[in-house]
């Protein structure tokens, strides 16, 4: 059986690594990825040492059942390389994590267990017994199962002359005292602000988002017991938030971080218990607050951000950019602060788009996603933040039929599972996916023996 994985970022790498561990063997693993290396993608391609993981090393192993896998790799590879990680509870640069995934996959490529096809997938056409994969080069590959693992895409800000984060030219040619505007106040903004600081920029950085919320920081949290019976599945969003606040204030918790961490094993079930209306309400009213508590900064990063704010060099604004125009001197913008009717006119040397990741597949720049949607082989989930995917990861088409051979995991499946973008969540999807394919291989073997 051939399993083709479309996408070679972190999601695709984890899927390939888990499949390579199949005890029964029998699966030929092909990863279709145009990049030279599998494992980095957009998130872990950065070479800035200040861009740290926002999850401790102990919880970033490629395999949930080998929590020390990454730490042991760091101990082997880190000697003499300047990677500071004395304990499994440290936060290492994201580029280092990308190197870890790439090295793990490379080992399996060298052993012949994974094949890297350096091409771009532009279409998948399912038939009764297989899936035909069309590549940008004109070549085709046939497989029994296709796993869509295309990961994250950068979000475009229509109408704004903005630079995209992490690109080579995002921070180039910015003079030391030039004012910079960043749209977005999440972790991507933090990356860009710290990069500016490290390259010697000493001008004012203004970051704006509708609520002006900044990610919280990690601190040592107490492990708290929480059972599924205590979680209010199906409750209205207001009731759910009230329950979470009460839970944070219980004597056993002491710190809200402990409460959020205790809830994590149940978040996917909690999400699936919500109606479409409840999910939309969550996205509109509660999402921003959830994410700044759920996706936190490493302690070192939090200190640097606090220092930038204390010095007045980083300003966080609750509001929105109502218009922007490129001028010879930079970018002229109109800024509407939250709760105010007046529009401030300001000028900046550079505007950087840090509004987050693209979530609406209808606006995807990926030719494969556009083709699948146009043909009706896939459909956008009704809440608009990913493809419609069954709980067994099967792609759902425009006629609401589940595919038998085309699956989607990771960020593409965020509408089905919500927690579908962080490594601990993606690796659990990969583990379940591998078990499903292992079961299919067993059935295939039994059928051949009849």
Image (tube, helix red, strand yellow):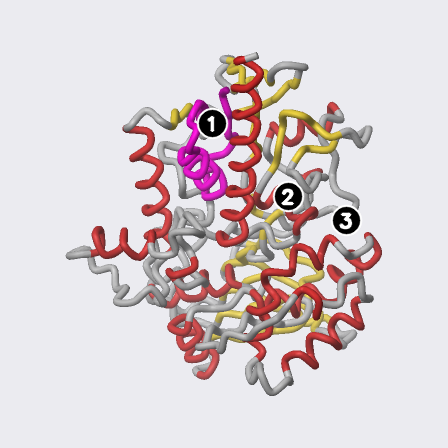
Q: Which residues are magenta?
A: 1-29
Residue at image position (71%, 56%) is: 271
User: Label 1 belongs to which residue?
Assistant: 32
Crowding near the residue tagged with mark 2, few <14, some 14–19, many ≥20 C-alpha atoms within 10 Å? many
N-terminal label among 2 and 3: 3
Asked if the residues shown at circle 3 and circle 1 are in contact, with their CB atoms under 8 angstroms apart, the answer is no
User: Label 3 belongs to which residue?
Assistant: 383
Q: Position of residue 324 (x, y in %)?
A: 65, 57
Residue at image position (56%, 46%) is: 154
Residue at image position (55%, 68%) is: 261
Name which quarter of the figure residue 22 lies in. Answer: top left
Seen as rendered, the residue at the extreme front is 450
For marks 2 and 3, give the CA distance. 12 Å
Q: Nearer the viewer, mark 1 or mark 2?
A: 2
Seen as rendered, the residue at the extreme bottom is 251
Secondary structure of residue under mark 1: strand
Q: Above or below — where is 304 with respect to 78?
A: below
Residue at image position (72%, 74%) is: 338
Secondary structure of residue under mark 3: loop
Q: Which disc number belongs to residue 413?
A: 2
N-terminal label among 3 and 1: 1
Q: Position of residue 243 (x, y in %)?
A: 73, 76
């Amino acid at each position: 059986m051939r399993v083709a994985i479309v996408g070679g970022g972190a999601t695709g790498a984890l899927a390939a690594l888990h499949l390579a561990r199949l005890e029964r063997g029998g699966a030929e693993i092909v990863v279709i990825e145009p990049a030279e290396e599998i494992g980095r993608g957009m998130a872990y391609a950065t070479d800035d040492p200040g861009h740290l993981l926002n999850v401790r090393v102990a919880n970033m192993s490629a395999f949930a059942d080998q929590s020390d896998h990454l730490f042991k790799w760091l101990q082997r590879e880190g000697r003499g390389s300047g990677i500071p990680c004395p304990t499994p509870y440290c936060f290492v640069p994201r580029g280092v994590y990308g190197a870890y995934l790439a090295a793990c996959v490379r080992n399996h490529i060298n052993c012949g267990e994974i094949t890297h096809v350096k091409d771009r997938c532009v279409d998948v056409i399912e038939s009764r017994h297989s899936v035909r994969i069309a590549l940008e080069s004109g070549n085709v590959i046939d497989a029994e199962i296709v796993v869509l693992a295309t990961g994250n895409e950068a979000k475009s800000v229509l109408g704004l002359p903005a630079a995209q984060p992490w690109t080579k030219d995002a921070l180039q040619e910015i003079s030391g005292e030039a004012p910079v505007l960043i749209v977005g106040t999440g972790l991507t903004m933090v990356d860009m602000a710290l990069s500016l600081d490290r390259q010697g920029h000493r001008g004012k950085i203004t970051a704006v988002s509708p609520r002006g919320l900044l990610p919280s920081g990690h601190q040592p949290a107490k492990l708290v017991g929480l059972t599924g019976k205590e979680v209010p599945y199906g409750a209205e969003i207001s009731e759910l938030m009230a329950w979470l606040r009460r839970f944070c204030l219980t004597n056993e918790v002491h710190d809200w971080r402990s409460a959020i961490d205790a809830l994590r094993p149940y978040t996917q079930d909690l999400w699936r218990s919500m109606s479409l209306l409840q999910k939309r309400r969550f996205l509109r009213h509660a999402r921003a607050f959830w994410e700044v508590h759920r996706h936190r900064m490493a302690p070192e990063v939090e200190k640097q951000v606090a220092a930038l704010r204390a010095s007045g060099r980083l300003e966080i604004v609750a509001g929105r950019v109502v218009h922007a125009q490129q001028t010879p001197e930079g970018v002229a913008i109109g800024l509407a602060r939250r709760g105010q009717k007046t529009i401030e006119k300001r000028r900046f040397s550079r505007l950087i788009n840090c509004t987050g990741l693209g979530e609406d597949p209808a606006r995807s720049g990926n030719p494969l996603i556009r083709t699948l949607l146009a043909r009706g082989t896939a459909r956008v989930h009704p809440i608009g933040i990913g493809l419609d995917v069954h709980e067994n990861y099967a792609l759902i088409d425009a006629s609401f039929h589940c595919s038998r051979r085309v699956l989607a995991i990771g960020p593409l499946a965020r509408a089905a599972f919500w927690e579908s973008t962080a490594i601990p969540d993606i690796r659990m999807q990969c583990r379940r996916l591998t078990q499903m394919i292992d079961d299919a291989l067993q059935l295939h073997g039994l059928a051949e023996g009849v």
